[in-house]
Image: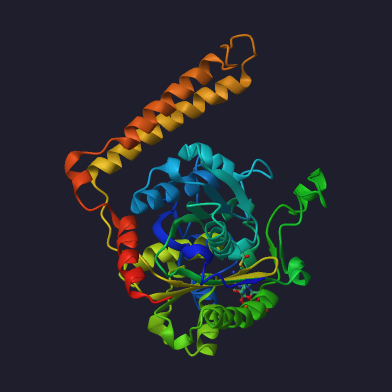
Amino acid sequence: MTTDLGMMPFGRYAHIVGWGKALPDRVVTNHELEQVVDTSDEWIRSRTGIQQRRIAVDPGETTATLAARAAREALEVADIPVSKVDMIIVSTSSPEHTFPATACIVQDLLGAVNAGAFDLSAACSGFVYGLGVAKGLIASGQAENVLVIGAETLSRITDWSDRNTCVLFGDGAGAVLVQSSPVPGGILSTEMGCDGSGGDLLILPAGGSKMPATLETVASGQHFIKMNGRAVFRFATRIMAEATRKVLDKAGLTVDDVDLVIPHQANERIIAVSMRNLKLPEEKVFRNLQYYGNTSTASIPIALCEAIEQDRIKQNDTIVMVGFGAGLTWAGTAIKWGVPTEKEVSFWRASQRSASYGLSRARSQLLRLSHHLGSNLVTEEGDSLPQVLAKRLEEWRKLLESEEPLEEAEEARPETDELHQQNASTEEKTPE
Ligand code: ACO
């Protein structure tokens, strides 16, 4: 599927205005893996470029908690209250459950009371697919603020006795807030593709309806990632360059217009071959896979955050994000970066958000309680006591979100409003 919504109807453009990442604390080096399987630091570095990865060793740290942490950071950078989020898209191959969707758990953790939520399954291409969906929702007027999150705890579905796969993957999450704006730019074009005939090349065979869990599926390791590495490698090196060219073409751009490519961080050799095919100079390609390994759908948003931290992205830069993954899928997007990347979060706003999340947690607990109570103790409106309390907490939270210290209210509104200010001047200058 190809979409070219660069020229959006009704002047609605989709800009990334917030970004955040979350990584488990535990670093696992290649040397540590030498103790687990028959491998070596030298083999892993030379074949993949990976030196270490992060692993969620605490059972309380899950795909949803990592996703929520990254999302909170993105909301802080965007400086919008969580109640303004219309949709939460969580892309993941290691969801908490088959259902409910991990996105629903994230909605509850954030207290995003006005958001719809769903999971997106397109493996490592999922985050970029999510950007395409977010752009479509914004272009059609169905959403103003969409959280797109890529989150994985691949370590939980990795066979730690299989050296072909266990050295590759890592855990983590990255999130962006995509916002509607009348300012031209933002997500210019997207390319989302699939070749389902390659589905068996990278697969988690059991646990779905085709191969339900049995003692045998567990005993034979069918609940772990299985991969034909060489075939995936061949596919990846071809498709990364192809998808980049297509997405640039759709945006009316060429490789020379690109300031930075953020490719899926799977393998240093895949990135090198693909970018060489595109004749892109080294300095225009972002890499951080040496620190995190392949975090699947989280790899591009984590890399985006680090590119911003390292000052590799500036306002008005042209960015390409491109990935491939199980499916087989691929996806690319070309973005005209619309907002300043140096952002500061005020102490007041940080405290306000933290209090708001505290109220959300309390509200969530009360609602959980109400789902499990009988229907005897209800008000005339049909609300149970916990529901009444939860509503009261939500009112307090709204009140808190509307609070603004005088000096901040008087200052120019933060970065997202800069888009609107810019737009006023762009619209004045742009002839029909
Ligand atoms: N340590 C030491 N030796 C190893 C290891 C290891 N960890 N893993 C494999 N080997 C051995 C193999 O057994 C093989 O030995 P043999 O020749 O005796 O059979 C030898 O190394 C070479 O194996 P190859 O598969 O040819 O190695 P290759 O250079 O292709 O590298 C790799 C393997 C890194 C997996 C590469 O094929 C690759 O990166 N493929 C793409 C994988 C990928 O990106 N997957 C993620 C997709 S995104 C997603 O959706 C999650």
Give residue 224's quadrant in the image. bottom right
Q: Residue at x 73, y 54 (%)?
A: 221
State which quarter of the image contains the C terminus.
Answer: bottom left
Residue closer to the observer: 215 or 43: 215
- Reply above or below: 370 against 21: above
377, 37: nearer the viewer: 377
Left or right? Give the position of 229 relative to 380: right
The reply to whether residue 140 is visible in this rendering is: yes
Position in image of residue 167 (x %, y %)? 56, 65
Name the residue located 42 percent from the left edge and 62 percent from the top edge.
Answer: 182
Q: Residue at x 42, y 65 (%)?
A: 304
- Tell me: residue 370, above or below residue 17: above
Q: Is residue 94 visible?
A: no
Locate the N terminus by quadrant.
bottom right
Q: In the image, residue 350 lies at what x, y percent? A: 29, 43
| Point 33% across, 74% down: residue | 429
Task: Quadrant for residue 214, please give it.
Answer: top right
Q: Identify whether 396 is placed above or below 23.
A: above
Q: Is residue 160 above or below residue 397?
A: below
In the rendering, at what x and y percent does residue 7 appear?
Answer: 51, 72
Q: Which quadrant of the frame does ligand 1 lie within?
A: bottom right
Residue 328 in percent (x, y) is at 69, 69
